[in-house]
């Protein structure tokens, strides 16, 4: 039997911390909760953990400073929690070494799923054997024909769909806002609404489902945008696609 993974929750909202603990315990994780940013580093230096769920806004010492300090001595996975969308690029920057981030408000189930995904990548261990996240073969993108291939299958995209997918694909796990995607796809600065991006994403996902039926490649991040991160589809998502 695999040892339980230990998650350090650093969150000053007591009710939210309790909810996160309940969901993580149900997923067979052990947890420890700290609410004061000033206490995190000393506690971390004397207690081994497998991952840190770290809020950005904390009393006394904020999450950014905590992440910087921890990264000087440890490569422990860190998932940042933030309500400040403008901090996105900094949170995922190499200088901070954050492995992922989640925007408030969020679903506790999403937090658990993201923790499992980061742990799989970090420790090369299948935390949940029923939800593999690796592609069995690499995707091949052909910019001349706007074609994507994988596992002997092939799909054709429109020019805009291919550009959209390529932007996300080239920077895995980075979250792009709708405005950022519009700027990269429509470089003639035409006026395009957010709904246009959502429509393209919907069509792109439908085509990708025909290429890789078991894998969800493009994920919506509530309040932030979209990101590319191959992950096995949940039963609910698979049912929606069928």
Image (cartoon, helix red, strand yellow):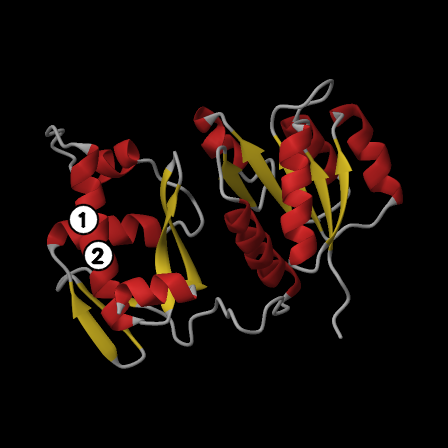
Q: Is residue 52 above or below residue 161?
A: above
Quadrant in which residue 54 is drawn:
top right
Quadrant in which residue 195 is drawn:
top left
Residue 161 relative to residue 135: left or right: left
Residue at 38 percent of width and 67 percent of height: 215
Quadrant in which residue 36 is drawn:
top right
Task: Tell me if label 1 and label 2 are in contact, CB under 8 Å.
Answer: yes
Residue at 21 percent of width and 74 percent of height: 154
Q: Secondary structure at mark 1?
A: helix
Q: Secondary structure at mark 2?
A: helix
How would you rate the neighbour count of disc 1 (Cα within 10 Å): few for under 14, some for 14-19, many for 20 or more? some
- Name the residue carrying label 2: 204
Residue at 36 percent of width and 61 percent of height: 237
Percent x, y for residue 7? 72, 49
Let me know if residue 141 appears in the view.
no
- Name the residue carrying label 1: 200
């Amino acid at each position: 039997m695999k040892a339980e993974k230990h998650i350090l929750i650093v969150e000053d909202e007591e009710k939210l911390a309790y909810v996160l603990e309940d969901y993580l315990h149900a997923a067979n994780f052990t947890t420890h909760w700290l609410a004061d940013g000033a206490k995190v580093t000393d506690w971390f230096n004397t207690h081994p953990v497998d991952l840190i769920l770290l809020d950005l806004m904390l009393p006394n010492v904020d999450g950014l400073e905590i992440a910087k300090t921890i990264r000087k001595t440890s490569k422990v996975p860190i998932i940042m929690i933030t309500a400040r969308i403008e901090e996105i690029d900094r949170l995922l920057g190499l200088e901070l070494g954050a492995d992922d981030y989640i925007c408030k408000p969020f679903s506790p189930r999403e937090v658990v799923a993201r923790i499992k995904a980061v742990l799989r990548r970090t420790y090369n261990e299948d935390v949940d054997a029923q939800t593999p996240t690796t592609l069995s073969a690499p995707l091949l993108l052909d910019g001349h024909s706007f074609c994507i291939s994988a596992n002997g299958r092939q799909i054709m995209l429109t020019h805009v769909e291919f550009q959209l997918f390529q932007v996300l694909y080239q920077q895995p796990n980075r979250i792009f806002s709708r405005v950022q995607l519009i700027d990269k796809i429509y470089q003639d600065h035409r006026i395009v609404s957010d709904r246009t991006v959502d429509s393209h994403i919907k069509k792109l996902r439908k085509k990708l489902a025909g290429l890789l039926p078991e894998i969800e490649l493009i994920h919506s991040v509530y309040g932030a945008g979209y990101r590319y991160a191959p992950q096995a589809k949940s039963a609910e998502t698979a049912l929606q696609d069928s």
